[in-house]
Image (cartoon, coloured by chain):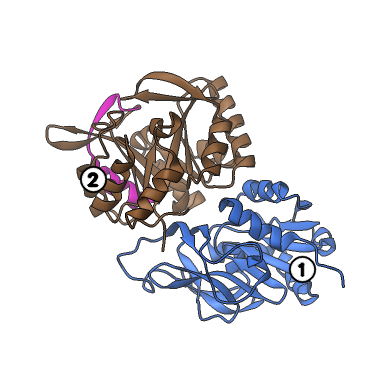
Amino acid sequence: MIAVVDYGVGNLFSLCCSLEKIGADTCVTSDPAEIRSAEKIILPGVGAFADAAKKLRDSGLDKVILEQAAAGKEIMGICLGMQLLFEKSYEFGEHTGLGLLKGSVIPMDGTIPTELKIPHIGWNALHFTKESKLLKYIKAGDCVYFVHSFYVDPGAESVVATAEYGKFVTAAVQCGNVMGCQFHPEKSGEVGLNILRAFCEKEETL
Amino acid sequence: MITKRIIPSLDIKNGRVVKGTNFQGLSDVSSPIELAKHYSDCGADELVFYDITASAEGRQLFTDVLREVASQIFIPLTVGGGINTVDDFDRVLKCGADKVSVNSGAIRDPQLIYHAAQKYGSQCVVLSADIKRVDGQFRVFAKGGREDTGMEAIAWIKKGVSLGAGEVVVNSIDTDGVKKGFDIEMLQAVCDAVNVPVIASGGAGSVQHFTDLFGAIPTIDAALAASVFHFGQIAIPDLKQELKKNNIIVRL
């Protein structure tokens, strides 16, 4: 069972449909017991970092995620959900994230060439920088769908894929059992479904 | 590098796809679900659904169709038509739309853009404008191109973006349905005025028109068309190959 954490941000309809499409057994839940019993956890999210981080804390689910990550369970953050895995964000102020991954979230405004439009909206090609299970069924150059105005500082050691938008911006990350993507796999056609497939597939037993 | 997007648009009436010429003379084309699947499989980068029904029954059919499309097709979906309130945003977003385009509803109440952007984010709010030249001026038309609002188009689009619209669809009534190419002059004026993605609509008749558009306006983000795709005059894979040959970056 894959637990999709429901903490009151964003529309989970498309994500759930795409998980269903790849045959993943999914539950959308805010119940700590259900999250604890799941094999893997997906942390979705759209909107503002500060608001989402607060909702996660207010619901107490931040502690459940931290405890499950420490226990070695695989966790995938999507879009804002991925940003929340990091230490902090400079989106309208300075806000603390879950701190499961080292690094911070920075604005595009002022860090990419001024002639480029913000948000970064559309399909962009992936450049692989490290191996990651998320990239197992796709290839460098495959395009995925982005919608964002802030991004994880690409200097973070967990970066496994980037996309070029005036500079190389962080597209996917992984450090052990904690991983995520800035783009929307549920809106990235077959490539996106293959990323979800790679995350959701059962570990091979030794 | 970000790719230029190719977007088929589907006008939906009573659960079926229709397409008019110069906004009149509608003819039934195909099933929205079949057409959407076909486009997704052959490389469309996004789909736009315009609900052109007026009745409550038609609206219900539309949301049913939308939900079914969204559960089977995993590319961005934009919905327009009949969006007058934040509740209308809510209704279509719940059925799987990713973006909502506002047109007459925003002309009637520009604050709709602001309130929707506050609630769902600018990336979710698309300002669609039907524009026609009147007395040497770009003029905004409402109600599917039937009513001259008297508003100058560039000023209106700038206002919409400042209120929170995250993308702009420019539909030239002057070139729509004529199939003699996109309205480069009008589109360039809009691209020069705003710093959000601009989507060209109205006038596509051949592959050359798309290469002309992206060649003439490097800052344009996407091209939208309906009948040339629906009637098979242009196949999206061929179009993208041709764009690539012309050094225009596309998703293949």
Residue B40 placement (x, y as % from top left):
54, 43
> Would you place residue B170 above or below residue B145 in this image?
below
> Would you place residue B45 above or below residue A95 in this image?
above
Work out which quarter of the rendered image holds the C terminus of chain A and state it.
Answer: bottom right
Question: As drawn, is B81 to the left or to the right of A21?
Answer: left
Q: Amino acid at mark 2?
A: Ala
Can residue B197 be seen here? The reply is no
Q: Nearer the viewer, residue A182 or B103?
A: A182
Q: Secondary structure at mark 1?
A: helix
Q: In which quarter of the view is residue B25 placed? A: top left
* Label 2 Cα crowd, 10 Å radius (few <14 / some 14-19 / many 20+): some
Find disc 2 in the rendering and name its residue: B155
Can residue B25 be seen here? The reply is yes
Apparent colour of chain A: blue
Q: Chain of mark 2?
A: B
Q: Amino acid at mark 1?
A: Val
Q: Chain of mark 1?
A: A
User: Furthest-right residue in view?
Assistant: A206
Q: Is B149 colored magenta in this rendering?
A: yes
Q: Is B120 colored magenta in this rendering?
A: no
Residue A6 placement (x, y as % from top left):
70, 55
Give the residues drawn in magenta, as a range: B144-166
Q: In which quarter of the view is residue B108 placed? A: top left
Give the CA distance from mark 2 to mark 1: 50 Å
Apparent colour of chain B: brown
Give the numbered dot on residue A64: 1
* Label 1 Cα crowd, 10 Å radius (few <14 / some 14-19 / many 20+): some
**What number of labels is visible?**
2
What residue is at 76 percent from the left and 68 percent from the top? Answer: A64
Work out which quarter of the rendered image holds the N terminus of chain A and state it.
Answer: bottom right
Question: Same subunit under labels 2 and 1?
Answer: no
Q: Nearer the viewer, residue B131 or A195?
A: A195
